[in-house]
Image (tube, rainbow, N blue to C red):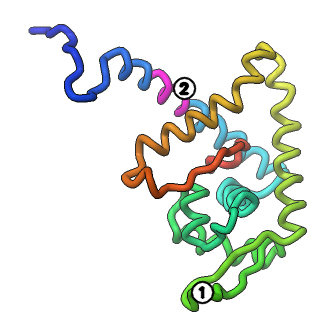
Amino acid sequence: MTTTAPTAPTSGAPTDAAVDHALEVLSALTGLIRTSRSIGRRLQEEGAGASGTPVAVLKALARADGHDRPGDLAVAAGVAPSVVSRVLPKLEEDGLVRRRPDESDARSCRIALTDEGVAHLARVQRLTAARLAPALDGIPPGDLDRLPRLLAELDRALVRATDPHPATTRHHETTTTPQDND
């Protein structure tokens, strides 16, 4: 079996060390997502709130900044547009969102959080955070202080890595709950 030594990068190709770091990050992220989904399912079973996709849509609406069409919400929530189309009727039925016609495009609609939707999202996030808080006790305070910023940077980096049109993408800072990943 012949082995070859790592070669120097050519024309912007990542180094072996950079690829190894990316593998470590992806491995940790995969574990975090798996755990987050499990926690989200458990919280839903305990009646602590909605499942991940509806919460992700509510969070996307909470930070919509005028991007409140179903397609925009799908991008912001990280799901397919058909998923948003299936979730919206239930959210509307529950009084958490309201739809109105888009005045500039008769084929589309605008979605807005209701006051009840804002309160529901705050409750779900608070319950999730209350469940998480004791588990964070073992993390050194300095690391815990840096973690939200680092995770937001990772989120933006992942978007950059997968975005075919980075100049046109509007990306936001995010905060996540374990339910966001369902």
Name the residue beneath numbered marker 2.
28
Question: Can residue 136 be seen in the rendering of this structure?
Answer: yes
Position of residue 136 measured from the top left corner of the image (x, y, whole percent):
80, 23
Q: Which of 141 and 138 is in front in this view?
A: 141
Q: Which numbered disc, 1 or 2, marks the residue that appears first in the sequence?
A: 2
Q: Disc 1 versus disc 2: distance between alpha carbons?
A: 44 Å
Name the residue beneath numbered marker 1.
104
Disc 2 secondary structure class: helix
Whether 26 is among the magenta residues is: yes
Q: Tell me where residue 89 sits by quadrant.
A: bottom right
Q: Is 139 left or right of 101, judged from the image as shown? A: right
Q: Nearer the viewer, residue 150 or 79?
A: 150
Q: Would you place residue 58 above or below residue 148 in this image?
A: below
Residue beneath the point at 23% across and 20% down: 9
Position of residue 11 measured from the top left corner of the image (x, y, whole percent):
21, 28
Q: Tell me where residue 83 sits by quadrant.
A: bottom right
Q: Is 47 left or right of 26, judged from the image as shown? A: right
What is the span of residues highlighted in magenta in the rendered image? Answer: 24-30
Residue beneath the point at 71% across and 32% down: 148
Position of residue 103 measured from the top left corner of the image (x, y, whole percent):
65, 88
Q: Which amino acid does label 2 sit on?
A: Ala
Name the residue furthest bottom: 106
Q: Which amino acid does label 1 sit on?
A: Ser
Whether 89 is among the magenta residues is: no
